[in-house]
Image (spheres, coloured by chain):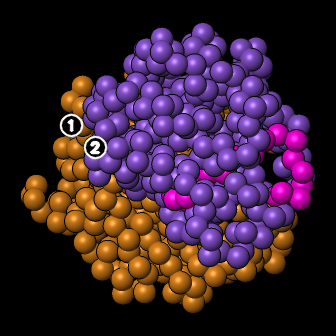
Chain colours: A purple, B orange
Amino acid sequence: MSLSKLFEQKQKNICSIFLTAGYPNLEDTVRLVLELETAGVDLIELGIPFSDPLADGPTIQMSSQQALKNGMNIKLLFEQVELIREKSDIPIVLMGYVNPVLKFGMDEFLSRCKQLSIQGIIIPDIPLEEYTLNFQAAFEQYEIPFIFLITPNTKVERIRKIEALSNSFIYLVSTSATTGAAKGFNKEQLAGFEAVRELKIKAPLLVGFGIHDSQTFNTVCNYFNGAIIGSAFIRHLSNGGEVKHFVEGIKQPAIAS
Amino acid sequence: MNYTVDDKGYYGDFGGAFIPELLQPPVQELSEAFALIQKDEGFSERYKALLKDYVGRPSPLYFAKSLSAKYEAKIFLKREDLNHTGAHKINNTIGQILLAQQMNKKEIIAETGAGQHGVATATVCALMGIPCKVFMGEKDIARQAPNVARMKMLGAEVIPASSGSKTLKDATNEAIRYWINNPYSYYIIGSVVGPHPYPEMVAYFQSIISEEIKIQLKEKTGLESPDVIIACVGGGSNAAGAFYHFLDQDVELIIAEAEGHGLQSGKSAATTVLGSTGILHGSKTLLMQTNDGQVIEPHSISAGLDYPGIGPQISHLVQTNKATSVTIKDDEALKAGFMLTQTEGIIPALESAHAIAVLEKMSFKAKTVVINLSGRGDKDLQTYMQHL
């Protein structure tokens, strides 16, 4: 299913899960994605491991390191996505740092993404300026959406520029932190959400960083279209937990407080 | 050919600012503040006054008579080793702490390899009364104990980086992560690496080295410029500073890179030979990486050169053949360190010993050569003694 179709069908409570490809074991990617789909996850973010993930906290650093040890690389990732595509058309976006993608070759990367119906690319170390300078032409040529990140500290003028360039969802970073670092949302963060909501950004917004349970999931879903859960899911896998239990835990209704 | 930065933050093909969105506001703020101070005479006066009275500049340009006789050239040593704290690193930290003060920053963070930049940062933080956190690889903490002790005595908190190779690369990762989580802190990068405007800014504060070389050489020889300048390169800050005012002149620029155990050994840090274009720590530059684009863990006997990349300007200089790279093995650097000590009575830092070792590899007959002696060897005595 295309992402635009997903956003047509569902405007609220979109549940997106991030997992590092090739973690915990090299061959787990396909199984985990299919199980996540069965458990009712709407969108998959597949992480391409990198040796120096400087926007990530310890959990995703650890999963990246393990995936690299397992032998994960972009070529294998595309082979795994091919296997997923034999059984599922769940929307998938790829997330990774710019260096491995550049080394693989941006054109070939985007061309493979197109073939495998990848719905977008998140590269946290390509900001707006470098995107327009170096990469926009290629993304447009292959019609692959580049997914921008914004934060509560991003200036409105900059958000408007990003909004104008976006042709998919925008990833709202909930907090000034690397992944996995935040505990719950404080008043300041909620005020930040409110301020972003009031901008009435045309693109759908999914919130990431700091979403780890049904409470945080439901909180951000009150403001925006959905949320992305990463570190909490990786931790669950590391502890040997089942996919189904994790997704159920996230999607259960908020407990009134 | 233009060797300076363009308005997009690039040196030819290299540079840029590949930063997460969370770092966009502080980097933007820094760019604006840096642009302001370059036109601010008051800032320049404060900077120069501290360099003179606190750092002890100008550092001498010393004619090394015995060394010159040995290698049949006119060899001058730019004595950055005589600066307060023992290396060129303090030129940059003085500049950046004044900038941080101007920006009203309340906390300083830094990464360090050999500990020289960490000590230089801890020093200026003690001077200005600003709290300081220094990130340092666990492996470097073990091999640079004297500098760790100095940082602690200066009141800095030394935070071990235990990921990856546990050296400078990982210390830099940890510093950037801390900065992402605390965007109001001021990050003093120690080399000409990182996102724009850091490479430009650090080179700017280090350019005092070539500014002085120019004046001193003229006084001593009547020459406008030397034939050759040699500097070691980890990230490249002492080289960038020593080359700065000679980039538009006909001077042979040589960078000494750490070859480690040898180019084919898998234990090397010779980036311009082993590297290819990549992106690390916010800039596009030459980088040691696998075919999958994973960063290779480098090796050098010298902690300050133990880094898998080089600054974007240095990459540009090498790519356009303005500068030439000479690679120096661990044992060649050690040998050069002992040689300089016994010939001139100067114990160089292992980093700077790489620059000295170039004399053994190339002939500079009758030429005027300036070697940037970037630091002193006190911190490396333990390593030297193991090879006595």
Q: Chain of mark 2?
A: B
Residue of label 1: B261
Q: Chain of mark 1?
A: B
State whether residue B77 is above or below residue B230.
below
Q: Which mark is residue B299?
A: 2
Q: Amino acid at mark 2?
A: His
Q: Is residue B29 toward the left or the right of residue B62 in the image?
A: right
Q: Is residue B146 toward the left or the right of residue A115 in the image?
A: left
Q: Residue at x 78, y 70 (%)?
A: A191
Residue B354 coordinates in the image, percent (x, y): 33, 47
Q: Residue at x 55, y 58 (%)?
A: A214
State whether residue B98 is above or below residue A209.
below
Task: Identify the element where label 1 is drawn.
Answer: loop
Asked which quadrant contains residue A198, the reply is bottom right
State whether residue B222 is above or below residue B292.
below
**What's the magenta region?**
A196-214
> Relative to the observer, which residue lies in front, B296 or B300?
B296
